[in-house]
Amino acid sequence: MEKKAERMDPSPIGENKPRIDAREKVTGAAIFADDIQFGNGLLHARIKRSPHPHAKIIRIDVSRALELPGVKAIVTGEDFPGYIGLYLQDRYIFCREKVRYIGDPVAGVAASTVEIAEQAVNLINVEYELLDPVLDPVYGASSKAPLLHPDLGNYKVANFIFPQAGTNISNHFKIRKGNVADVWEKCKVIVEHHYWVPQIQHVPIEPHVAIARVDENDEITLWGSSQSPFAQRNLIANSMGISQSKMRVIAPYVGGGFGSKAGVSMEALVVAIATKVKGHPVKLLLTREEEFYTAFVRQGLASFFKMGCDSQGKLLAMENKFYWDGGAYTEYGVNITRASGYSSSGPYEVPNVSTDSFCVYTNHPVTGPMRGFGMPEMHAGLEQCIDELAIKIGMDVVQFREINCLKTGSTLVTGSKMHPTGLPICLEKAARGIEWGKKNPPSAPNKRRGKGIALMWKAPAMPPNAGSSTWVELAEDGTLTVGVGGQELGQGTFTVAAQMAAAALGVPYEWVRIAKPVDTRYSPYEWQTVASRLTWSMGNAIVNASRDARRQILEIVADAWDETMEDLDIVNGIVISFKTEKEIPLKNLVIYGLPKKDDQGWRGGPIIGRGTFMPTYVTGLDPETGQGQRAVVHYTTGAQAVELEVDMETGRIEIIKGVSAFDVGKAINPRLVESQMEGGFIQGVSSALFECLQLKDGMVQNPSFVDYRIATSADIPKEIKTYIVEVAQEDGPWGARGVGEHSMVPSIPAIANAIYDAVGIRMEGPPFTAEKVYLAMLDAGVINE
Amino acid sequence: MSFHNISVRINGGLEQAVVPGNMTLMKMLREIFALTGTKNGCSAGECGACTVLLNGEPVNSCMVLAVECDGGVITTVEGLAGDKQLNIVQSSIIDEGGVQCGFCTPGILLSAKALLDRNPDPTEDEIKEAIVGNLCRCTGYVRIIEGVRKAARQSVPV
Amino acid sequence: MSINPHPTLPEFDYLKPNTLEEASRFLVEHPGQSRPLSGGTDIFVRLRDGAIKDKFLVDIKHLDGMNEIHFDATNGLVIGAAVNMNRINSFPIIREKYGILAEAANSCASYQLRTRATLIGNICNASPAGDTIGACLLLDGILNIHGIQGFRQEPLESFFQGPGKTTLKTGEIVTSIQFPNPAEGLQGKYIKHGRNNMSDLSIVGVSVVGAPEVKNPSGFRMRLALASVAPTPLVVHKVEELLTGKKITAEVIREAAEIAQNACTPISDVRGSARYRRLMVKNLSIRAMSIVWDGLNGKI
């Protein structure tokens, strides 16, 4: 019998299904953490913070603050001796003995109003003994620098991170592949360059916010704007010495994360305070100013590149040194050091690579994950060097990349082989999209035009055993609820989760609901919403859960119809038999099962499917060489090209056109993928042209929108083109892999390369502000005063 | 501190409140009236997440005192949709994919609505100028602008 | 800019006096702790930062004449103190006859802030970066001020004493600004150089106005003012002298720009270096003067 049933809706995979959360968001009904109503019992927290970058705490006097009417509790590090951290436990919840950055939390106040809490904070007196600060990572890595973490050797640490006890280096990742030293003489040209990429911040439009309440059973509930409810539960519970099951994290919609709301930053503070005011919810909402420097910032990077190629333009050797300005605590930042290390060849095949990637403690704001996880910072310099090498050997920069870029089967810097990749296709599409080779005239006599291109690669940076789990549950009318632990940050998690569940089970997309908000009491475990891993990892778990439910359903029906499961399918919410053409809707059967013949009982029962996914094949890397069988789960690769103009009278850069092409394996929802490419590109442009946390003596000079500029609607290019390339990921749902971070990675070098094309100036690091570009042109003699 | 008895019309309904002199319109909307669609992004008049319409004109509600609104007419995002359907800017921005995390969205919608009220056929540059005070970190503005253009093309008055 | 501002506005009393007299009297009776409140866009930010600590804000927006704009050919243009920037940018007679004022008003911040921000507020805040001040100076603005002694007038050119400092005495409230009828054929240009394309403060601002004036050797009168490169908004008189006395050419414009450059005294801060600012004063002065010159010659 031929398959009669055609799905009346095409499978939702690959369709631009409307966002599942759009209506809530446009009506203002969507609840974010600061919107939750807690009633009159809500207390407000404010934090006493260190005004010094490095100092010993001599004495904390809270007596005057405690006398203020309305103050309910004050806590200090005395009360919380446990360390906390994701990959390295190097920080306390509140400082004990030392402060290590301006903004480090020294005490916390809970009071009946924010104003009283603030007044109380100002009445707390702290005596410090100033210590010499470390304000530069290269200095910090040297033996001359004071030790910021003398106990580094005793900290608990993940087995793939290598802190150097007795130094400020909290991770040293090495690549020693081939024999770099011997190969330089074989190189026809060598390029050596160093760059400084300053700290920037994620600038989510919703600042960090968390509310905590401890009940009479000492069970903690934490509400927050969070990418990582389960990781927060785990880290805070560990630090406080309690069971994970005594802590519940509820995470509503996130108003932008970009990594800032991963791991634990300010959430532990409010949990700690809440333990002293049992029964009361306590809220901490960061001011925008605090957001800029007291949660997470992106690491600064001093990068030193040396690379060489032969006369045919084939890359022979790379020698890299990365000094990451990790800030006061690098419990999360250490892995950026590692990720950049194992990616340090860039998306190229290079037979000889030597890399030393150092995570260095400094007395600067705490660094953590930010979109790209080290890749934007690293590619900023690497992709410029590639251009320089090509130019020096007299080769077109696109052609140079065509020769050297990774292809399926290429040998990687960690020794394994590249899985199927569309990187060459991405390069070709980006070059074609920007009309590479065609020189367009400038729009005015005082402008110069240029084009630039850059490639990128990135793997999800995570422990080798980061897992996902999901459940699916059906209602009487056959509609589906999917439980996930992955968070909706705007990238479309809930929408693609619904699409994948619908496709894998066989129901229309419109029948699917996501069980939200994510609540660790009811939602299934998800490691974190980071690393562009959800579509792939959570997606696999969803497919598994849907298949599990599907199997249960088909088992019941097969039994009832006396057929085999292989002849049955679920299409549009109806179970059909290809053999007999019988049909039965899911309705009711998914709760009540089906009756046996002649009223002789029932079969089946409530359907609940479960699925998990955890990669099992990631191996360790040799600590001395960085070589291993499989360093990562997979890589997403891509290319970006820009055309820009430089105003020769002011140095102002205007991006005329941007083209992005990324290999996502399979676009579950193409419009959402394009949206990531557009948004990431603009965030990349913003980081290239405007953004910089201006640090002076450890203090951020510009912690507000007035002086930390980000791209506005008036700053976007006239034309943005995006291309989706689909070379399937072997173990991805329908072949999908992630793209959320990748679109921001190549922007800085693409722009820098275009600036060079326009005016012949090599920029040593972003942001390429009008002032920086102008003065660089002036000092190089490209223009005169 | 002074306290003031004020009356305001919010989303068509007449309301009364007693507000401290230093309470911003944003705080009043969020805390006294539980209209949490208006968002607090910076409290400094820079990000636009708190944008509402005051007497038909967009303002950063964190930069207006509640008491200054006495006798005024306020529209928040909650007041945009009709009983049965979304208003044209809301549905257009959804259609074009201009919503991601949603935090800037209420402010954007009100800036856009006010733009179309005063200029029903704006150019792309005019749209960009109208929302330059609404920071978005997710979308790159591309699809937001497309959404406003789509809304403008429908000539149904908002 | 504070790294640790108040999370909310600090406490203060809000007052809404019935008359100007009441307002001035209250300010005089509470010196150093009270100030007039108009748009609030500068005051609320500074209160939150702790830069000012007033306990009383005296709202003046509703008082007589504060919301009026009127123009007649004899008396020129009068703009009330509470008129917001959006209104100035869209008012037909201002766009037609005082174009640079509309352009400068529209360059401030964002549409939302311009709904509240006022011209007079921008002037009284007396920031050297104030966008509209150059235009007001070049258009020969005169302030009408009400104080305990009654009304007085002050030409804008004597008003600014330093960053944030004006000649206003305690109790004084600026009620309006008036501009004489502009010269026939007036052209103006405000160039604001910020870090973004729009909505930023100015790192350097250049205002230029010009009009035919047959009695001058050059046949024209051209004036130039600078923002953000001196302790106060700066009218560079020597530029006017040069362009009054000499036939205007591209070379002379260049010379004038160099005069402007030599007159400015920029500082280095988080927004830009003194070096860059000086260089931009020259380049943007050339740009602004060239645009005005082209306009005077009918090329625009």
Image: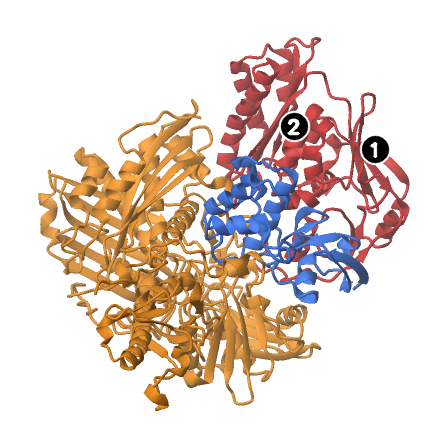
From the viewer's perspective, is residue C116 above or below residue A586?
Answer: above
Q: Say the numbered circle drawn on residue A91.
A: none
Rendered red, the chain in question is C
Query: A735 left or right of C248?
Result: left
Q: Nearer the viewer, residue B50 or A59?
A: B50
Looking at the picture, how far across and down is residue C93, in whole percent? Answer: 73, 27
Circle 1 is placed at which residue position?
Answer: C153
Q: Colour of chain B?
A: blue
Looking at the picture, how far across and down is residue B113, in whole percent? Answer: 61, 46
Query: C34 left or right of A267?
Result: right
Q: Quadrant of residue A460?
A: bottom left
The three-letter code of the residue at mark 1 reads: Gln
Rendered orange, the chain in question is A
Q: Taking the image as drawn, is residue A76 in sight?
A: no
**Who comes first in sequence, dot 1 or dot 2?**
2
At 61% from the left and 41% from the top, the residue drawn is B116
The three-letter code of the residue at mark 2 reads: Ile
Circle 2 is placed at which residue position?
Answer: C100
Q: Secondary structure at mark 1?
A: strand
From the viewer's perspective, is residue A425 above or below residue A166?
Answer: above
